[in-house]
């Protein structure tokens, strides 16, 4: 997140003012725990990279989707793979 990367240099309030974002919104986002969806995305990202690398880096989205279903039993939406 941009604010995290530059908060030491510019401060949260200054960054939020330039971006037009409420400071309270950003601070509440920092304090929230990581969602289950985000945790699952991290695990899925590793699996996707493994499938991609095992296939010489030439697999596209629909082939990765099929490989995840075939090899790991995971049904993943194409839009989720695109993220």
Image (cartoon, rainbow, N blue to C red):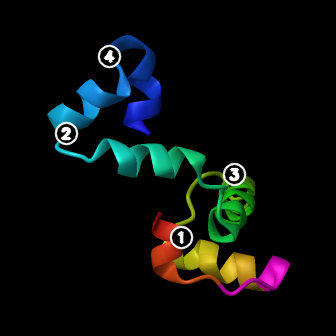
Q: Residue at label 1?
A: 81
Horizontal and vertical percent position of residue 16? 26, 36
Horizontal and vertical percent position of residue 54? 75, 56
Q: Find residue 10 and name its label.
A: 4
Labels 3 and 4 touching (C-beta < 8 A)? no
* Front of the two marks 1 and 4: 4
In three-dimensional space, the C-alpha distance between marks 1 and 4, rounded to whole angstroms, equals 34 Å
Q: Find residue 56 and name its label.
A: none
Task: Determine whether the residue tagged by mark 2 lies in a helix, strand or loop.
Answer: helix
Labels 4 and 2 touching (C-beta < 8 A)? no
In three-dimensional space, the C-alpha distance between marks 3 and 4, rounded to whole angstroms, equals 39 Å
Along the polypeptide, which appears first: circle 1 or circle 2? 2
Q: Quadrant of residue 47?
A: bottom right
Magenta-tinted stretch? 70-75
Along the polypeptide, which appears first: circle 3 or circle 4? 4
Examine the rendered structure and indicate whether residue 14 appears above or below residue 45.
above
Q: Residue at label 2?
A: 19
Q: Residue at label 3?
A: 53
Horizontal and vertical percent position of residue 76? 62, 82
């Amino acid at each position: 997140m941009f604010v995290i990367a530059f908060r030491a240099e510019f401060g949260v309030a200054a960054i939020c003012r330039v971006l037009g974002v409420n400071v309270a919104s950003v601070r509440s986002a920092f304090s929230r725990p990581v969602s289950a969806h985000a945790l699952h995305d991290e695990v899925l990202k590793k699996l996707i990279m493994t499938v991609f690398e095992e296939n010489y880096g030439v697999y596209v989205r629909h082939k990765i989707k099929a490989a995840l279903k075939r090899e790991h039993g995971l049904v993943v939406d194409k839009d989720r793979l695109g993220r």
